[in-house]
């Protein structure tokens, strides 16, 4: 399996009036050709910023990639010129965003929004580009595609808009699709449809997909590998089955334990057991943290954890963890 | 174990002496300060005029059309009158007109705007009337009134107030409408609060900030209109020096004595600029949401 | 579509009625005795009566109003007191210069100010932005006559590149016509440009912060396309609105500009009429200018439908 994307020690910082926010603070991973990768974490853990960093979409007035390397197909993306980067976006690496309502341009029709990528990257004339746009709409299973080409986003439902977004992202056959919370803003029933669509397209087109979400359930259903992020760092990377069967990081363990279960039993008084929460809150990313960022909320923390930040190391087959006490975590009953 | 968020204490300014506080205020609101400073300087100059500005009416035929010099800071016009003196006295007219128009238009506009926003029945008719008045370009409206009446400062003020009122009415009315729709007002009405009290306590205070901002813009606009009218000969009577009619009189010899036009003109521009800056600064301070729209 | 346009057109009628009523009642409600003021200090009783008759004040009010409105609809704007010529004829004579000046200014202002505003928004907070905004703030404060005289002094008197004043009709040739319009339209347009540039920048900034711009960027589209198609089209509604509102500025300024540059248009006609207190002319001009303004706003209103597909008709 060949490696499409190599991210090494990525650091993206934002410069605010309250100080420097270390949104992504040393993230490393590989993306393999044709695989479905999930990145999970709470709001503010840096997963979206990681995605935006790969495409270099961080607004220069607000932040910058300050360190690390992102290699795609052998090229270093961080030092690529703006012009070359634009050639890559929408063509080799595409992105789908969370809010289909606001992510589509309200004054341009659907056909134009899809076709313009085709014209730009595949250099086809407009007529041919519109035909391709129609093909893409068929591919994403939108009924009556010819009609839709001339319609505007406000005339479509949320699910349809997201399909259009996917069509837009895949129309030039990119090798990588980054989907940033693509179903969070949709109804539950539509969520399933969209996810299935994405899986389907992955099979058909061979696109590698990075699925960013805070929903562990979604990850379990769709992804092959999953990365867990916390406070701008990767804390665990594993194949899905391995992660869910035996989480090796206290945070992941906490996340899994916090999931509501359908098989809880009420006690004599009719009360149900409380959900297990992770105590504390996410740390502010402006203060330097010499040790592991999870320490204040960790039930396994020891002195060493406060002092030095653990690196991602292999704890089991293809299962990497950044934790000094991962042995104890793995032993603990879920 | 609770985790503290980053402490913001180290970013707050030290509560210091009045000097420190003033400096901080200046740094945070440069436009208000510059605008206000310019205006106050102007007011001071106009008030002190009788003591240092000389005689704006005195004609000195030997000193006709002299360029600016040590003796005549702004030179002289074709009648040998001191341009500096005339300019300073001209400031009075502009300030008086600007402030009076602004004040009157605000009061009238406030009253009408409150009534329109609150009482649906008269809203329709009055807003139609306002639309009609706004359709007529302000200078023309002023000119129409002036054509029909004897010349005088009072008429000029009245003629400028009328086209400015609809602007204020619009702003006040929109504030009233948005507040009136708020749940707490509905409950106050349901609770039997009297209209007057409602208007005074809940609605009026919220109209003040946008009203003040608009009033400054009206002031600037009024100054420009008055100068324009006087320039055309349709404003302040020529005996009273106004920047507009000083410039009008400077037209004949403009090419050889351009200072007679440029200097009063520059004064007008700077004054209007100062008022606009004050307005912008106030708007940014009092209502950042308005700032986005402009 | 036509139904929509007709409806909008119909909506302008009440406004024009108010304008007509206002102008009508102004004469009759003005403080003092307008007739005496118009006729002059030392008018005889006969002259006063003549003026009264000319103004149509010798009939009952309702009859006056109806007759007058009917006349307006047929293009009869009354008779000038001093020249005894029909006001409509006087207006038509002076229409071309004013129309030329207004259109030229509109074109120049929009073609300069919108790109400046877009540029300022694109390079927000950097030097070019501060410069453009500085110009906008200054420009908004500059009285038209000051700008006019400065331009004349620089380009006509000192450099001799352009004529000091005057107007050359189109019939005399394209270049002389344009030449005579350059300085006046710049002078008239400065305040207008300042306003448009400011609103363009504000609107573009708001649009550029939107999610769909980020999507456009993520598709690798060229900056030009993102700015000018994706962003500007969305920003256009407020910009076009302010272009319409600014027409009022233009019309007010036309009177002064024509005086400064000695252009024999409607503005000069207005000034002459005021000084001679020839009210029928002023009356007619108000109706014409108000109608012009209303028409422009109507066009702007209709244009919204083409700019933003969410606006239904």
Image (cartoon, coloured by chain):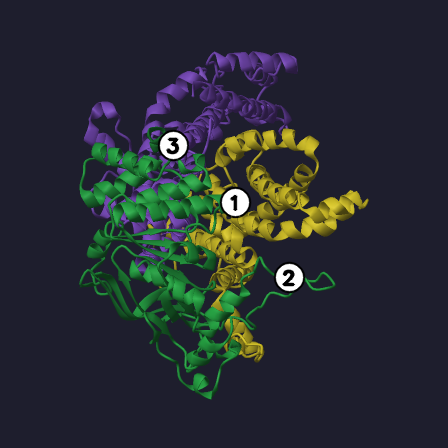
Chain colours: A green, B yellow, C purple
Upstream in sequence: badge 3 or badge 2? 3
Q: Nearer the viewer, residue B100 or C300?
A: C300
Q: Which residue is mark 3?
A: A143
Query: Residue sitting at 24 percent across and 46 percent down?
Result: A173
Which element is circle 2 on?
Answer: loop
Relative placement, left or right, of A132 versus B144 is left
How far from the left and from the top, in percent, is residue B262? 36, 51
Q: Please give the residue where the numbered disc 1 appears in the rendered image.
A: B222
> Badge 1: few (under 14), some or many (20 or more) residues near its Cα, within 10 Å?
many
Dot 2 crowding, Cα within 10 Å, few <14, some 14–19, many 20+: few
Percent of width and height locating residue A178: 33, 55
Q: Nearer the viewer, mark 3 or mark 1?
A: 3
Disc 3 crowd rating (10 Å Cα; few below 14, some 14-19, many 20+) is few
Residue A86, position as x, y percentages in the image: 24, 53
Give the CA separation, mark 3 to mark 1. Answer: 60 Å
Residue B119 position, x and y percent, is: 70, 36
Q: Is residue A112 visible?
A: yes
Location of residue A306 (image quadrant): bottom left
Q: Is residue C2 above or below residue C152?
A: above
Secondary structure of the residue carrying numbered label 1: helix
Above or below, C269 relative to B209: above
Return the mark for residue A265: 2
């Amino acid at each position: 399996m060949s490696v499409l994307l190599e991210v090494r020690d990525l650091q993206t910082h934002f410069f605010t009036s309250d100080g420097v926010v270390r949104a992504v603070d040393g993230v490393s991973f590989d993306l393999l050709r044709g695989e479905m990768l999930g990145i999970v974490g709470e709001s503010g853990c840096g997963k979206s910023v990681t995605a935006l960093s790969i495409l270099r979409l961080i607004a220069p007035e607000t932040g910058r990639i300050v360190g690390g390397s992102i290699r795609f197909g052998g090229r270093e993306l961080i030092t690529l010129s703006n012009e070359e980067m634009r050639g890559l976006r929408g063509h080799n690496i595409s992105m789908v965003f969370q809010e289909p309502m606001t992510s589509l341009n309200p004054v341009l029709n659907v056909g134009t929004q899809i076709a313009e990528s085709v014209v730009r990257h595949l250099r086809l004339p407009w007529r041919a580009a519109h035909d391709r746009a129609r093909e893409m709409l068929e591919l994403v299973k939108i009924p009556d595609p010819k009609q839709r080409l001339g319609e505007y986003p406000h005339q479509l439902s949320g699910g349809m808009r997201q399909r259009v977004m996917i069509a837009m992202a895949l129309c030039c056959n990119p090798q990588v699709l980054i989907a940033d919370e693509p179903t969070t803003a949709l109804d539950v029933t539509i969520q399933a449809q969209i996810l299935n669509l994405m899986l389907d397209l992955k099979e058909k087109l061979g696109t590698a997909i990075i699925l960013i979400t805070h929903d562990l359930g979604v990850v379990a259903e769709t992804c092959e590998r999953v990365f867990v992020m916390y406070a701008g760092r990767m804390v665990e990377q594993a194949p899905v089955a391995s992660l869910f069967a035996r989480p090796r990081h206290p945070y992941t363990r906490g996340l899994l334990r916090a999931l509501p279960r359908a098989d809880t039993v009420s006690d004599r008084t009719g009360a149900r057991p409380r959900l297990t929460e992770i105590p504390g809150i996410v740390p502010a990313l402006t203060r330097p943290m010499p040790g592991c960022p999870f320490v204040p909320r960790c039930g396994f923390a020891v002195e060493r954890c406060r002092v030095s930040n653990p690196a991602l190391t292999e704890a089991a087959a293809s299962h990497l963890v950044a934790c000094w006490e991962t042995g104890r975590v793995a032993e603990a009953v879920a | 174990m609770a985790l503290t968020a980053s402490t913001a204490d180290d970013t707050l300014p030290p509560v210091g002496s009045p000097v420190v506080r003033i400096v901080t205020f200046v740094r945070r609101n440069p436009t208000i300060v510059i605008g206000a400073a310019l205006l106050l300087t102007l007011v001071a100059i106009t008030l002190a005029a009788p003591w240092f500005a000389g005689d704006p009416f005195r004609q000195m035929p030997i000193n006709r059309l002299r360029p600016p010099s040590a003796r005549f800071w702004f030179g002289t016009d074709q009648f040998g009158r001191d341009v500096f003196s005339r300019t300073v006295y001209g400031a009075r007219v502009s300030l008086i007109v600007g402030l009076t128009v602004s004040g009157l238009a605000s009061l009238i506009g406030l009253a009408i705007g409150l009534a329109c926003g609150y009482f649906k029945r008269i809203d329709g008719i009055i807003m139609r009337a306002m639309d009609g008045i706004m359709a007529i370009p302000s200078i023309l409206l002023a000119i129409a009134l002036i054509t029909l009446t004897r010349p005088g400062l009072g008429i000029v003020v009245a003629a400028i107030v009328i086209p400015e009122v609809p602007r204020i009415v619009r702003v006040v009315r929109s504030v009233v409408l948005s507040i009136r729709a708020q749940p707490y007002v509905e409950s106050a009405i349901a609770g039997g609060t009297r209209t007057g009290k409602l208007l005074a306590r809940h609605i009026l205070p919220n109209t003040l900030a946008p009203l003040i901002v608009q009033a400054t813009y009206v002031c600037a606009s009024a100054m420009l209109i008055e100068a324009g009218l006087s320039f055309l000969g349709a404003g302040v009577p020529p005996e009273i020096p106004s920047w507009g009619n000083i410039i009008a009189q400077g037209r004949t010899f403009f090419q050889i004595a351009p200072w007679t036009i440029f200097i009063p003109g520059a004064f007008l521009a700077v004054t209007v600029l100062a008022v606009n800056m004050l307005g912008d600064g106030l708007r940014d301070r009092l209502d950042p949401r308005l700032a986005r729209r402009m | 579509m036509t139904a929509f346009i007709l409806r909008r057109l119909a909506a302008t009628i009440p406004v024009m009625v108010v304008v007509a009523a206002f102008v009508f009642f102004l004469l009759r409600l003005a403080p003092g005795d307008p007739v005496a003021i118009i006729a002059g200090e030392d008018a005889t009783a006969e002259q006063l009566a003549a003026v009264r008759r000319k103004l149509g004040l010798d009939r009952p009010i309702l009859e006056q109003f109806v007759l007058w409105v009917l006349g307006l609809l047929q293009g009869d704007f009354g008779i000038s007191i001093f020249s005894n010529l029909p006001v409509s004829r006087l207006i038509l004579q002076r229409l071309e210069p004013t129309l030329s000046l207004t259109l030229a200014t509109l074109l120049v202002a929009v073609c300069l100010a919108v790109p400046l505003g877009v540029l300022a928004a694109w390079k927000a907070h950097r030097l070019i932005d501060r410069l453009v905004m500085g110009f906008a703030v200054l420009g908004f404060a500059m009285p038209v006559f000051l700008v006019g005289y400065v331009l004349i002094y620089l380009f006509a008197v000192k450099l001799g590149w352009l004529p000091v004043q005057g107007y050359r009709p189109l019939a005399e040739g394209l270049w002389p016509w344009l030449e005579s319009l350059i300085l006046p339209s710049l002078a008239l347009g400065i305040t207008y440009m300042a306003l448009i540039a400011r609103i363009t920048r504000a609107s573009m900034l708001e649009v550029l912060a939107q999610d769909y711009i980020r999507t456009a960027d993520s598709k690798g589209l060229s900056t030009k396309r993102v700015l000018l198609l994706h962003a500007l089209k969305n920003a256009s509604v407020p910009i076009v609105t302010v272009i319409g509102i600014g027409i009022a500025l233009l019309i007010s300024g036309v009177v002064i500009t024509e005086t400064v540059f000695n252009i024999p248009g409607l503005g000069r006609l207005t000034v002459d009429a005021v000084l001679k207190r020839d009210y029928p002319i002023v009356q007619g001009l108000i109706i014409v200018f108000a109608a012009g303004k209303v028409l422009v706003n109507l066009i702007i209103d209709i244009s919204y439908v083409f700019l933003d597909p969410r606006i239904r008709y």
